[in-house]
Amino acid sequence: MHTDWDKIDKELNDGMRRIREAGLRGTNRRSFIDQRPGGNLYYRKMSKAEWNNATSNGSKNYDFSKALSYFNKPLYRLWMSTSHDKCEVFGNENAVNQEDSVIVCFRFSVSCLVKANRRLVKAHQEPGAQHDSGCIAIHREGFDQTGNMSSSGDVDRVLEKNQAYNIGITSSNQGLFQRFLEESYICQPFQANRK
């Protein structure tokens, strides 16, 4: 499997540029950097087509298996973040344009990382993690502090400090997330903590 590092670098640089621009417009950049995980909430920016496909046109809860089967690759990761703001400033390569993107909030009944066997949660840059479809990958790329994570110690520190993070799941472990998904909805910042 070929990784297009130039494309990844461009996406990260574009995202950081949008963060800087948002800061110039008065957005509180510190809230993005310091945003703490909100319980069992995760966010994902996606195209409206992905949302419609994975929810039968928005009529029911998001079906992770539908989204992952669309890509039909065992190592494809569906990424989510504990930071709404990070999703807002970073693009989505599957959206035709920014207007085609939505941010979806996923609320789980429990922490899926706690329910997962701890050995399945691996730092995204840990040797072998990117080629292990059974692991739940975790990273902080795009955040100012503790960016790349390359060891289980990095994972432990991020979780102990309650820092925001991103997770990537595959078709091998999506069932865990589906089982504990209480609801999913297109959200706006003020709706992120709805009950």
Image (cartoon, helix red, strand yellow):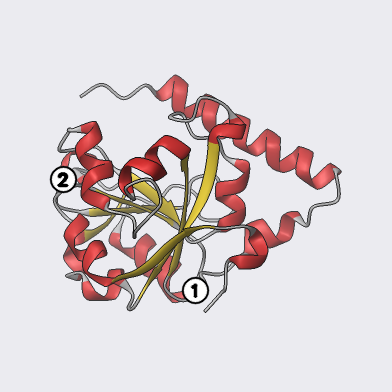
Label 1 secondary element: loop
Which residue has dot 1 on it? 161
- Quick check: 191 above or below 100? below
In space, the residues marked 2 and 1 are separated at their CA atoms by: 27 Å
Q: Position of residue 187 (x, y in %)?
A: 56, 58
The percent position of residue 55, horizontal first and vertical second, equals 34, 50
Q: Amino acid at mark 2?
A: Ser
Q: Which residue is mark 2?
A: 133
Q: Position of residue 38 (x, y in %)?
A: 52, 73
The answer to whether the residues at label 2 and label 1 have Cβ atoms under 8 Å apart is no
Report crowding for label 1: few under 14, some 14 to 19, many 20 or more residues within 10 A (C-alpha): few
* Quarter of image, res 76: top left
For residue 70, above or below residue 149: above
Residue 124 left/right relative to 6: left
Please give the name of the residue rendered at 50% of the width and 27% of the height, measured from the top-left corner. Answer: 9
Q: Residue at 28% across / 75% down in the picture?
A: 114
Could you say which quadrant of the image residue 34 lies in?
bottom right
What residue is at 27 percent from the left and 48 percent from the top? 126
Q: Report whether 150 appears left or right of 41.
A: left
- Look at label 1 and name its amino acid: Lys
Of the residues tagged 2 and 1, which is closer to the observer?
Answer: 2
Secondary element at tag 2: loop
